[in-house]
Image (cartoon, rainbow, N blue to C red):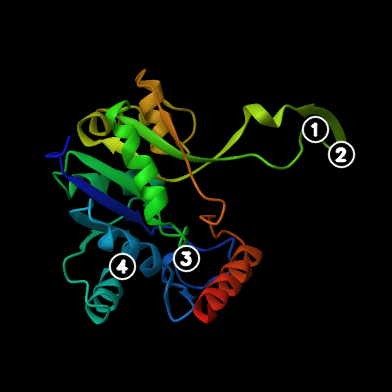
Amino acid sequence: MKNESIAAIIVAGGSGARLGASTPKGFVSLGDKPLFLHALEIFLRHSAVKEVVLVVPAGFEPYARIILREAGMPQVLLVVGGKERWQSVQNGVAATSAHWVLVHDAARPFVTNAVIDAVLEKRVAFDCVITATPEVDTIRMHSGDLAGEVIDRSKLIRIGTPQLFRRSRLKEAFKIPSDLSAPPTDEAVLMQRMGIPVGIAIGDLANFKITTPTDFAVAEALVAYRQKV
């Protein structure tokens, strides 16, 4: 596996509607730079990642090129996303010939080398690996306003990114969505539909996804704190 190349695909195709942003979420400034640059920098510096692909909404390619040029990242491949997330990932996968692809949400700016390493280590046993963290809250079923039974949280995990895929198998999996009643929440769902085991790598609770204004406020506070220490 030492001779098998690894590419990272950063998906910045979210609209930012739930965040209340007027631009796509990946372009909203967090600290002193656009959101997508935070994760992009980590993957570019990782020694195992040989290629990085950035997927952006249609029409935002010129803006993204300016940002990448000013950040000194001309080597990043820029790709236009699709209507659904899986289509954006598919476009990113088509832009690289790497043996493995790490798919990561631009809305998770606090990914670390340790999390990436944990995922990559699992590729000796799995063609698909997802990042996960334990569920710490009490979880219940419910019916409207009526609380139902408590679910055993020891059997539950929260799924995040990066997620790792053997590129050749993922390309096959992209044939599946047309048979689904709803778009897949992530590409690991497609791999499971093909009967491919999905491995788990323990992630980091700080690698959360920015979705709401509250999430963004927490992210801003974390960035400010890290700049002080």
Q: Secondary structure at mark 1?
A: strand
- Of the 4 image quadrants, the one containing the N terminus is top left
Q: At x 25% / y 79%, what residue is drawn?
A: 66
Residue drawn 40% across the image and 51% down it: 114
Residue type, mark 2 in image: Asp
How far is disc 2 from disc 3 in space, using C-alphas?
Answer: 32 Å
Asked if marks 3 and 4 touch (Cβ < 8 Å), the reply is no
Among the 4 quarters of the image, the one containing residue 171: top left
Q: Earlier in the sequence, mark 3 or mark 4?
A: 3
Q: Residues within 10 Å of mark 4 (few under 14, many from 20)?
A: few
User: Badge 3 local density, few (<14 within 10 Å), some, or many (20+)?
Assistant: many
Label 3 vs label 4, nearer the camera: 3
Secondary structure at badge 2 equals loop
Q: Name the N-terminal-most of marks 2 and 3.
A: 3
Per the model, the C-alpha gap separating discs 3 and 4 is 14 Å
The disc at residue 145 is 2
* Cβ–Cβ under 8 Å for marks 2 and 3: no
Q: Check disc 4 and report the residue beneath it.
A: 59
Distance from the alpha carbon under mark 4 to that under mark 2: 43 Å
Whole-number angstrom distance, CA of label 1 to CA of label 3: 31 Å
Q: Are marks 1 and 2 in contact (CB under 8 Å)?
A: yes
What crowding class fits label 1: few (fewer than 14 Cα within 10 Å), some (14-19), or many (20 or more)? Answer: few
Q: Is residue 82 left or right of residue 17?
A: left
* Res. 138 visible in picture: yes
Residue 50 position within the rendered picture, expressed as x and y whole percent measured from the top left: 18, 54
Outermost residue to the right:
146
Please name the residue that numbered disc 3 is placed on. 25
Q: Outermost residue toward the front?
A: 229
For image coordinates 36% across by 69% down, the residue present is 37
